[in-house]
Each structure stands twice: as C-alpha cells, then as structure tokens.
Amino acid sequence: MKKLLKTFISIMLCVCMVLPNAAYVSAATLGQVKRLKASKTTATTITLKWDKVKGAELYQVYRYNTSSKSWTKIKTTSKTSYKVASLSTATVYQFKVRAKKGSQTGKYSSVLTAATDPDKVKDLKIKSVTSNSLTLSWSSVKRADGYQIYALNSSTNKWSKIKTTSSKSYKVSSLSSGTYYAYKVRAYLKLDDEKICGSFSSSVGTITKPGKVTGLKCTDVTENGYTLEWNKVRGADKYYIYKLSGNSWKYAYSTTKTDYIISDISAKKTWYKVRAVAFLGDQKIYGSYSDTVSAQSKKTTKTDTETPKTKYDPDTPKNLKAVANPDSKYIKVSWDEVKGADGYQVYRYDPTNGSWARIITTTSTSCKYSVDETGVYTFKVRSYVTKNSKKYYSSFTPQTEVYYKSNNQSSNETISNLEKSGILGYLYDPKAKCFYTASDPWQRNFGFSPIYDACAPFAIMFYNTKRMKFYYGGLDWMIQIWKGQYGWVFIGAEIGVYTKDPDFNVAGFYACASDENMLHMSMVLYHNDKVIVTRPYGEYWWCTGFVPGVLPSAILGAPVGNIRTDSLTLVGRITLKNETMAAAFVKALEKNGFTYGKTYIKSGADVIFTWQ
C-alpha cells in the first residue's frame, strides 16, 4: 500500500510540473500583432488597422494615458480594425494592440504614434487687393504647426501649393492686373517627418485691380464735340469716364472700348479722367484713375473766348449713302466730294456700347466696310482740311442706315423680316438639313417660366433639361439646355439665354436675352454617335435644331419619362462676354453635375460642354 501511494504522488508531481509548461507553450503560439497603422484620420478620430493573428479570437486595443503615464485598455474587438473616436484635434496619441484567445494573450504590437487632423481653416478672406498683389488672412487653428496655401490654376482648373507658413496671413505678390485668382488654405501638424493636414478652407477668389489707365488724350475736336482716347488696360470689362463739376469729380459715361465720342458738351473747357473697371459677379473692382486731361469743343457762345468758325473749316459732305452688297460681304459707303477737303473720316455706330467709332480716314469719297453678320449698320462722315499741321473739321453728315443680310440673300424688307421672325418662328437650313428658330420669333415675347417645361408633355414634348443660373454684370442669368422628342415627328436640342433683374420677384421667370446680351455659341447633336443636327457658330439668344425622327419608346401613348433621351448627346460651345462671366457659368455647370476635363473644358471666355 505504501508503495502504491508513493507511485501516485510521483505521477501527480510530474503532472504539476508539465501543466505550466503546456500553458506557456499555448500562450507562446499566439502570435504578436503586426503592422499596426492608422489607416484614416480626421479631426476627432483615428482608425487603427492591423494584420490578423492566427488563432486569435479577440484583440485588445490600448491607448497611452499621458496624465497617468500608463496604458489603458480602450476596446476589445473581434475585428482587425477599430475607429477611436471623441479625440482632441491636432493631438498626438500612442496605441498598441495584442491578440487574445480564451484566457491567453499574445505579445503587444509595436507602439503606434498617430495624430488627429487639425481643424478646418475658417474665415479665409482676401484683403488689400492691388493691381499686382493681395493679402490672405484666416482664423488661427488650435495646435496647428503651420498652414499650406493653395492657388487655382485657371487654365488647368487644378490647385497647387504656393506657400507654407506659420503665420495667419500671407501676401501674394507678382500677380497680373485685372486677373481672377482663387485660393484655399489648410492647417497641418508635424509628426516626426510627416505633416498631418486638416481639411481645406472654403475657397475665396477675386480679381486684382485693373492697371492705371494711361495715354488719355483728346482728339478729333469739332464744334460738335471731341473724342477721348486712352490705352487698353488688361482685364478691364469697362471704362468709367469722370468729369470735373465744380470742385468734385462726377461719373459721366462708360464704355467697353478705348475711346469715347462726347457730344453733349458746351464751349467751356472740361476736365476728364478715366479708370478701368472689372466685374466679379455683382462686385465692381476699380483700377487707378488716369492723369487728367482737358477738352474744349469749337462751339462758340456769347461768353466764349474761342474764335468763331475759321475760314479753313470745310463744308459738310452731302448725299451720304450706304449700300449693302451681300455677294461681296461688304457695305459700300459713299458721299459727294467736298471742294478743298484734304480727306474724310467715316464713323460707324456701335450699338453694344452706344458710341461712335471711326472706321477709316480716307482721301476717297467712298469706302467698303467688311461685314459677315446680319444686322442694321449706321454711318456718318465728316471732311477735314490740314493747315499748318493742324486739322480743321466739318460738321458730321446726318447719319444713314442700311440693312445687311448675309448668306448671299436679298436684303429687301420681306426677306429680312422673315429671317427675324420665321414662319411660325421657325426656318429651314437646307445645308444642315434641319429646322431652327429665327432670330426674333414670336416666342421671344414670352420669356421663360418653369411652367413651360412642366406643361411640355401635354404638348407631346418629352425632353431632359438643365438650368445653369448665375449672377453677372448686375443681372441674374440663366443658360438652359434641352434635348429630346418634340412632338411625335421631331427630335432635337436647344440652348437658351435668359436674364432678369435681381429685384424682379416673379418666381422662376426670366426674360429672353436682349440683343446686347446675346452670346456667341454653336452646337452639335448626336443620335447614337451619328451627327443629326449642327448649328454654326454665331450670335444667339436661342440656338436650336430639329430633325425628323423618333426616339426609342416615343410611340403614341408612351408614358412620360419613358422616352430614351440618353441616346442623344449634345456638344455645345458658348463664348461668354469675358473670363469673369465664364468662371461664373462654369460654377453653375458644376452644380449641374458637369466635371472639368470630363464633361466640360474652359479656355479663356470659351466653354465647351458635352451632355449625354
């Protein structure tokens, strides 16, 4: 019996010695967590990720507590990732993870040091704008080590970093005058050799001030007035002319050209100065004033110290005529010879800015003015003599008008009226083999309302449409595009230009663009990659094209929305008035889902888009 007891005790001692070793082997076989990293960070979260450990059932996530200088377990998870939330922004944290199976745990991973992102930069502003510089400023971001400034490249529409600074402001220099610039800023936190960046601020943009107007002078002085001329300023959308009234300067005129004929004058000497203006939405950005110049007509009054009309002043030309020649694409302007005159100056009225522009100085009694657009052209002429290196001018002739019709067609009144209004508002292009709207159809009197599109199905018209709305030059603009089935016979597309005063409060209503607000554009419509409509590049308020055809599902009784307009692709080109207007239009395009480089491109004031 004693021998049997000794044997049992020996066995139990062996078991006690082996079991701890077995437990150790089990723990040792549970591998170490490897490749712990921060896969994503925000201002308040860090997402941890690590490799799976063979045999592991759970993972324990620990964070270092800098206050107690100890590690605290913050999560036990069965996944190989964990999003740590409710963290402080721009703050450095340390983490480690170990695997767990039952009561056994593996070796800790290497310690990961990671940081949350800085907060988004707020209150980015542009101030102190000059013709070649501007200053950016923004609010401080807590615990940020610095800031990265990015500028928009308007030609590529891409952002690039231009400066890293620890300051809350930065002066951008060496800019071009009258040019649009845009910027955005983000904060960063240094972590070893890495920079942890926060979200970008909202972008801000402006136009640098146009340059100072130079070369202002007074020319072509007559008893009826004179002309102010100056040098062109880069980026100028308009020029504002001021005249001295008493002891103060007052705005007098504006023009888009670099000269202006002034006829509402007295015989008294008047002082003028000019400055360039650029428009950014409803904001006006002014350049520096020119040097002043004085001007005085030859008109005489009782108090005039000027001498009356001199013996050198020539007679006014008579019998001014203007004849349109569509076959040769020119208008011939002619007048009777003035005895003793050394030459003649011919002026044409420019309806875009309401001013007269000299088109030629000649010794002949006629000239040819080249044209290629349908419209009314207005001319006037004066003669001059030169004595002692000085020119003496006659009065202008009464103005004369002529209607020019392009495309080698007659310019008689019946044809011109037909081209403007069409038959029921539509014309046929035999070369392109499509119908299109006339330049001044009856529809132009009714503007646009969303009700028209809502009621279209009742007129058997099923189409897709997009409306690009933006603000420019004191007006709300809308450029709308359509494509689809027009009745059961035609398929086609449209591009329309509409405007309204911002104070006009009728919901959704826009007026059709006036003549001065028409834009140059063209369009091509594809049906399953085949060109079916082309409209040439020209000036339109409503560019349209329709051809006989039926889209898929466009059968009598087809439900609304069942028409397959996706088989149509519209490619349009629109030339805006300037780059500022083009930038506003592009923003509206992007709000409608267009993407730069994919569905639209911009070059200067030109925008080309593809819509499928």
Image (cartoon, helix red, strand yellow):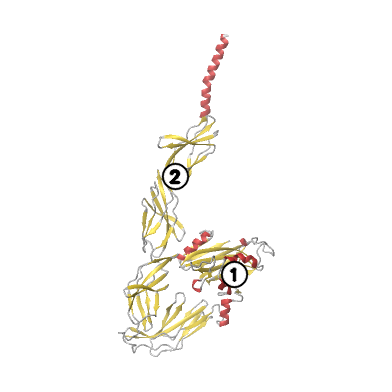
- Which quadrant is home to the C terminus? bottom right
Could you tell me how far apart the alpha carbons at marks 1 and 2 are, in whole angstroms?
56 Å
Query: Which of these two is toward me, 46 or 325?
Result: 46
Q: Is residue 555 left or right of residue 15?
A: right
Tell me the amino acid under the disc marked 1: Gly
**Residue contact at pointers 1 and 2, CB within 8 angstroms:** no
- How far from the left and from the top, in percent, is residue 49? 50, 40
Residue 116 in sight: yes
Judged from this view, the residue extending furthest toward the right is 556
Q: Residues within 10 Å of mark 1 (few under 14, many from 20)?
A: many
In the image, residue 323 lies at what x, y percent?
A: 50, 84
Q: Is residue 174 left or right of residue 86?
A: left
Can you tell which of label 1 and label 2 is closer to the viewer?
Answer: 2
Q: Quadrant of residue 536?
A: bottom right
Packing grade of label 2 (10 A; few <14, some 14-19, many >=20) is many
* Left or right: residue 343 compared with residue 555: left
Q: Residue at x 49, y 61 (%)?
A: 587
Q: Is residue 165 above or below residue 364?
A: above
Instruction: Please name whichever residue, 400 or 524, is drawn nearer the observer in this view of the structure.
Output: 400
Q: Which secondary structure, mark 1? A: strand
Of labels 1 and 2, earlier in sequence is: 2
Mark 2 = which residue?
116
SS class of the residue under badge 2? loop
Q: Looking at the rendering, which quadrant does residue 209 occupy?
A: bottom left
On-image quarter of the N terminus: top right
The tag on residue 108 is: none
The percent coordinates of residue 579 (x first, y second) are 45, 65
Which residue lies at the image location 39% right of the left edge and 90% below the top edge? 339
The kind of residue tagged 2 is Thr
Residue reaching furthest front?
A: 505
Q: Residue furthest bottom?
A: 339
Marker disc for residue 545: 1
